[in-house]
């Protein structure tokens, strides 16, 4: 009987291509998730019990989810964020966790620019006006000459910097582990402290991972450091922003606008933020382009197959699993 690989990531399953073919050609049976959304820890536990690998979307994998997963060798994240996977628990069970760095950077960077422009020119608001048979206008703001503050200057942050520079923005960043000086020089990006960056920027864009140290980094206090006209863009992770504080800042006019692709709870329903014209939302579509689905899918499948062949793939999120040599 063929060994099985669980696939929870929705666009991975739904898009035909080499990423699915190479799993089948290697002799594995693909087990699709029974639900069309990220799974909670108790939901994924029984599915992991019977498989040797999983191509994971944004599912929650805890120590309890892994308790019965005796045959599991690899959790291959279809994406880069591993904040929903208990890496220590995976390491303790000898399960390799892989990611697809860089495969989605362009798609997320383009969405970031789309959100900046949508908020700056109130595109969803104006679209609704025209659809309702009306014809009124609110003045927007231009990006040209404005200062962009990037919090996190990794793969996605750097791609955003390149695109924003083409719009004539001045690029600043805050990142405790910045890229090397030659990369900074080519981007024309200047370092700032977090407080300086928030105080100076016309647009602040988040491109850092979620961790205990970054949860609610954008809160009542840090929002108060921002200019009242500034725009906040979040395509990183929802929990990095205190959404109640964001609502207070936007609704009281202490912040100019915000655009978010990610939320503390997804699907994001019932929030007062959704009543504000200055707020633009997308349903976590950062990586969801035709090109990225195929690129990221192939990388996720190759990572899983490498582990199952006993090889070590490049992008491993828990290198400790390989012991002290790792
Ligand atoms: N919206 C989406 O669909 C989508 C898709 C992919 C990634 N993401 C999110 O984007 C994030 C960034 O992705 P990436 O590929 O650029 O990752 P990356 O690892 O290449 O870059 C992250 C950068 O953040 C920096 N950083 C870490 N802690 C920080 C802190 N406290 N303050 C400021 N900077 C800090 C790191 O030094 C690094 O340079 C991911 O962690 C993920 O959560 C979202």
Image (cartoon, rainbow, N blue to C red):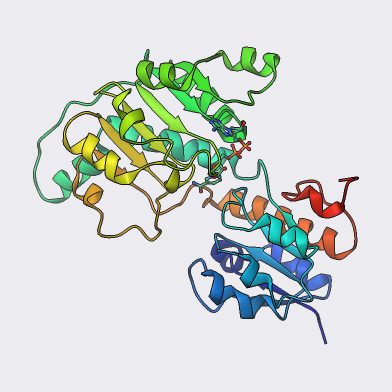
Relative to 156, does residue 291 appear above or below in the rendering? below
Q: Residue furthest bottom?
A: 1
Q: Is residue 187 something that shows in the picture?
A: yes
Q: Position of residue 315 (x, y in %)?
A: 75, 47
Relative to 204, does residue 53 appear above or below in the rendering? below
Q: Is residue 18 something that shows in the picture?
A: no
Q: Is residue 249 left or right of residue 241?
A: left
Return the residue nearer the eye: 263 or 126. 263
Relative to 172, does residue 281 appear above or below in the rendering? below
Q: Is residue 35 left or right of residue 141?
A: right
Q: Where is residue 228 in the image (x, y as percent from the top left)?
A: 24, 23
Q: In this view, does 115 lie to the left or right of 299?
A: left
Q: Which residue is drawn at 56% across and 53% down?
A: 290
Relative to 44, does residue 304 appear above or below in the rendering? above
Q: Quadrant of residue 124?
A: top left
Q: Which residue is drawn at 15% across and 30% down?
A: 138
Q: In which quarter of the image is ligand 1?
A: top right
Q: In this view, does 146 lie to the left or right of 53?
A: left
Quarter of the image for the N terminus: give it.
Answer: bottom right
Q: In which quarter of the image is residue 18?
A: bottom right
Q: Where is residue 50 in the image (x, y as percent from the top left)?
A: 72, 81
Q: Where is residue 199 in the image (x, y as percent from the top left)?
A: 36, 18
Q: What count of labels does the image hold?
A: 0
Q: Residue at x 59, y 17 (%)?
A: 187
Q: In which quarter of the image is residue 182?
A: top right
Return the residue nearer the eye: 130 or 237. 237
């Amino acid at each position: 009987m063929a060994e099985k690989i669980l696939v929870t990531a929705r666009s991975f399953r739904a898009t035909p291509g080499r990423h699915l073919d190479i799993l089948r050609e290697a002799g594995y049976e693909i087990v699709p998730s029974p639900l069309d959304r990220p799974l909670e820890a108790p939901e994924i536990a029984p599915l992991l019990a019977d498989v040797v690998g999983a191509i994971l979307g944004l599912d929650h994998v805890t120590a309890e989810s892994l308790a019965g997963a005796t045959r599991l060798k690899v959790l291959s994240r279809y994406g880069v964020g591993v904040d929903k996977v208990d890496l220590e628990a995976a390491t303790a069970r000898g399960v390799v966790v892989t990611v697809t760095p860089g495969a989605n950077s362009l798609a997320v960077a383009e969405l970031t620019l789309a959100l900046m422009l949508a908020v700056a020119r109130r595109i969803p608001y104006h679209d609704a006006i025209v659809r309702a048979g009306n014809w009124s206008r609110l003045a927007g703001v231009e990006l040209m000459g404005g200062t962009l503050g990037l919090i996190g200057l990794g793969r996605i942050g750097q791609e955003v910097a390149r695109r924003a520079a083409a719009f004539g923005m001045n690029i600043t960043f805050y990142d405790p582990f910045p890229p090397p000086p030659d990369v900074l020089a080519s981007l024309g990006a200047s370092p700032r402290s977090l407080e300086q960056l928030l105080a100076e920027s016309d647009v602040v864009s988040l491109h850092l991972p979620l961790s205990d140290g970054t949860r609610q980094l954008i809160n009542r206090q840090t929002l108060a450091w921002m200019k009242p006209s500034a725009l906040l863009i979040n395509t990183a992770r929802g929990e990095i922003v205190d959404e109640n504080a964001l609502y207070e800042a936007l609704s009281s006019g202490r912040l100019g606008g915000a655009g978010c692709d990610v939320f503390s709870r997804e699907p994001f329903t019932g929030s007062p933020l959704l009543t504000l014209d200055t707020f633009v939302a997308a349903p976590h579509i950062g990586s969801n382009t035709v090109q990225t689905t195929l690129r990221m899918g192939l990388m996720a499948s190759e990572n899983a197959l490498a582990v199952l062949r006993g090889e070590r793939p490049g992008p491993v999120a828990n290198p400790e699993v390989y012991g002290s040599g790792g």
